[in-house]
Image: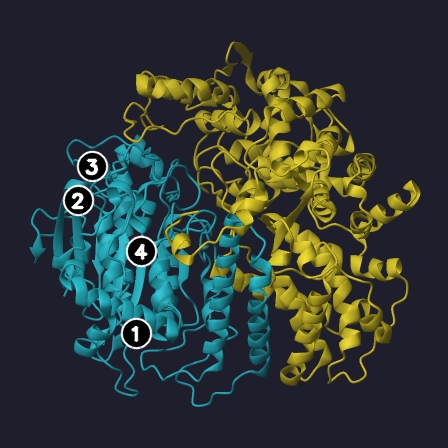
Amino acid sequence: MAFDLSRRTALKGLMNGSAIAVGVPLLDVFLDTNGTALAATGAPVPVRFGTWFWGLGVNPNRFFPKGSGADYDLPPELMPIKDLQKKISVFKQFNVPLDGAPNLPHATGGPAVRTGRAILAQGGLPGESLDVTISDLIGKRSRFASLEISSSGDPRNSLSGRGGGNLNPSEVAPSQLYARIFGTGFKDPNSATFTPDPQVMARRSVLSAVTEQRQALEQSVGAADKQKLDQYFTSIRQLENQLDVELTKPEPLQACVVPKAVADRPVNAEIDTVMKNHELMTDLLVMALACDQTRVFNMMFNNGASSLTKVGSTITHHQLTHEEVLDTTLGYQPNATFFLTKIMEAWVYFAKALDAVKEGDRTLLDNSLVMAHSETEFAKFHTIDNLPVLLAGSAGGRVRSGICVDGKGSPISRIGLTVQQAMGVAVDRWGTKSMETNRAITEGMA
Amino acid sequence: MSLKMKTFALGMAAVPLAGLAYVAAGAIHADAAAVTAPPAPTLAAPLDNVVGLRRLTESQYRNTIADIFGPDVVVSGRFEPIVRPEHGLIAAGAREASLSPAGLEQYDAMARNIAGQVFGEAHRGQFVRCTPADPKQADAACASAVLTPIGRYLFRRPLTTEEQAFYVKLAGDTVGNTGSFYKSLELALAAMLTSPKFLYVIETAEPDPARPGQMRLDNYSRASRLALLLWDSAPNEALLTAAAQGRLTDQAQLQTTAAAMVRSERFEQGVRAFFSDMLLFEKFGELSKDPIVYPYFNTEVFNTLPEQMLRTITDHLVTRGGDYRQLFTTNRTFMTRALGPVYQVQVKHSYGWEPYEFAPGDDRAGLLGQAGFLALYSHSGRSSPTLRGRAIRELLMCQPVPNPPGNVNFTAVQDTTNKAMPTARIRLDAHSTDAVCSGCHKITDPIGLSLERFDGIGAFRTTENGAAIDTDGAIGAARFQGAEGLGRTLAADPQTTQCVTTRAIEYATGRNEAADSLVEGIEKGFAADKYTIRSLFLRVATAPEAYQVPGKPLDDAVKHVTMAAIRQGRP
């Protein structure tokens, strides 16, 4: 594809010039040296990127390792990841400097991690989220540019988008997620037969024709409206791409096992329901990845100002973090921490589900990079410095996993920059104001 | 057109519009349509001077499809939510809203589903009045006769000759793959339904003769504005005809048209959409209550709460033509069997809604005594004077309340099981002794505390944890008791009527601001007309200022924007 070529060429130029300073791992170099290929076809195994979000942070003294580097210590709240410690890195002391912008409780931290910017008002994102940037690079050959999921309901619960009025809505119901991935239009890569659907061919030609109208439409609109139309046509291109995938015989994928349909079930913020919906949607997502239906995903376990509830409790997870008394003997808020325990349990379920899928001599988790993070450090006081961030997987060997990295108070955007570079995005500087950085985290790179 | 005819056309709006097109244009024969189509503007004409793109909301989309194709065409799918700007309306967010790949994927699926129903065997006869020479082959004349009038309704203006040719060719080109004339029509219609010309209301402008050098919305944009503002749907035949004849830029004729529209039955649909936006009804989608604390709060109750509020609003404001201020004091509402236990009232009918009037001592005054409002602004297991007070300030008085500071210390608020602090008033008092907190709590809590005799789902109670509830309330200097006192105080507060006036203007223009002079002028008239909602919307719909285009759109239009700039969020 011409676009890829030019991007790759540009990246090469960058590498030849200031490769060391920039530290961009070159996509094709990595695949040549470290990448594994599927035995059946010789095609490189795709590398996936995803995020996993949880709201309301951690109890810092019970979560962050005291030391750093490999074989880091596991305080009680991190203990659940023990089995996967070699595949999960922990980032501590990365801050969110706001340059005088307000710390909007539970709204500032998430967008800061995803966009490297401080929001000025609630509603929408202050810029393009990094998963979208990565999807523009690696999401073009799969059926879906990305899949957004919220296991606690509300399609607005999303931190993915191009900024302003553009937010990628989340799937909230397992049955709908199933229908979208494995319903009409899904082609089993391991099916012996393949017949392109003439109806899909017709739709494909309709979309091409629609795209041809673009210039006539954009010629007389103002800048803001042109931007909206550009985003519209980007979405049209993704739809065209989806049909192209449906019209192409897929490569066989050993790990792909088409799951059974999922029945309708309740969607709400009650913790047991959320855990179950998270499990079901994780399983569907894992197969969507194994069947190469998408290479980018965003999973929201709960929302920023967590509305999680427990049956019989008069207040939500969010209120508990503020109103529950700190137990002086325990040193934390037991009822609020109950939810955090559940969150870590869900995160481990998620990572293990990815790790259970074998792809050649690696696992799906190894071939992915998953950035898990929250929107506050300690929710009781809305602190956003030292936001907890975890990176799971090694992006197919591009990223060193299983270490604890101490940011020493440097901006959190360094993690976003590093992650984009690891995924092959030609970016050497990211974020705005005090979060603008060109300092990728070199110790995290393989 | 005589007044009588206009009333007739407006009254017919509930009938599928496509049918009306043929009535209006006379019998169209398939063979004649392609060659003798009325002269349409050139491609550039309707898209000249685009001054705004507003994404259709879910209800506008649904109402448009029902109006054009009939209510039996089912719209099933998920709509990408429009991001609500802080302290603003979704109507203003629609002006900023783009479409994500996932959102477009859904629109595409909905479009194909709708098109499949429209040209499926059950409905085909209604929309295809010509017979293709061969149902397995392309028939340009017949396709044009079918698609051109539908396109006019969907795009809210006549198709250009190029657009007509485009969709006819699209249908023709796909016959090879589909092997069916009707399937190709489906694809062409689906393409219209996923076009930005349908999904976005494209506002276009023309020079304003009253203000040399400035622009105003042109006739077709006014037709869309009126229909979306007053009916929450696309313009019908009468409005498109009025636009074609240039009547909507004539102040007197604009007045006559809008006056007929606010008198039509469909105005209720517009009022529902407005209040759903103003009162943040999307929050009902996230509402959940603890089943152990609130066993009465089942799915049926949950589903009826927004409808009860809308019925109360439209009954008072539209059916009865009541004073907006009395929306906060009225005793009238509607009940279903499911709501009986929540309100502790007898409901006669097992199914459906029945009118209900509260007794004066019930303290259920107007909108704020409704379980929907009380439950929405509560926590999952208990009431919240702060959330209720904040909602009243922000939504009904248009006074934004600051967010709590990032480093707030809530330790003063103890849990509800603390015997020393049985009521919310006592707990909040303790919290508000902290100077950092008291600044904001003193503008929200005294309002919300007056509603404390309603629990987290709006059920009546007189005690909390065994202690009697004190319903003393205050807004500024005004002191009152309970929900009735709050209702009377809000009704008397000029902020309340000024707020709804401001919101109505913002809703019409889709801009997160309204000029003070315009608000003042319209509110004066609103007051003179005893604060009826028809008066307010008629004034907003006919104010020349609301059709003026702010800024210099022509300069913006030629500015080149690179993808790189968009990526970096630069304008």
- Judge from the rendering whether residue B345 lies leftward or rightward of residue A437; answer left or right: right
Q: Which residue is mark 2?
A: A410
Q: Which residue is mark 4?
A: A52
Q: Which residue is mark 1?
A: A46
Specify the chain shown as yellow.
B
Task: Identify the amino acid type marked 4.
Answer: Trp
Task: Identify the amino acid type marked 2.
Answer: Ser
Tell me if residue A381 comes above or below residue B57 in the rendering. above
Badge 1: how crowded within 10 Å, few (<14), some, or many (20+)? many
Work out how far the residue at label 4 is from the one at label 1, CA to CA, in angstroms.
Answer: 19 Å
- Residue B298 seen: no
Badge 3: how crowded within 10 Å, few (<14), some, or many (20+)? some
Where residue A116 sits: x, y (%)? 29, 47
Mark 3 vs 2, N-terminal side? 3
In front: mark 1 or mark 2? 2
Mark 4 vs 3, N-terminal side? 4
Q: Let me know if marks 4 and 3 both belong to one chain.
A: yes
Work out how far the residue at label 3 is from the one at label 1, CA to CA, in angstroms.
Answer: 42 Å
In front: mark 4 or mark 2? 2
The residue sitting at 66% across, 65% down in the picture is: B114
User: For numbered disc 2, what is the local secondary structure?
Assistant: strand
Work out how far the residue at label 4 is from the one at label 3, CA to CA, in angstroms.
Answer: 24 Å
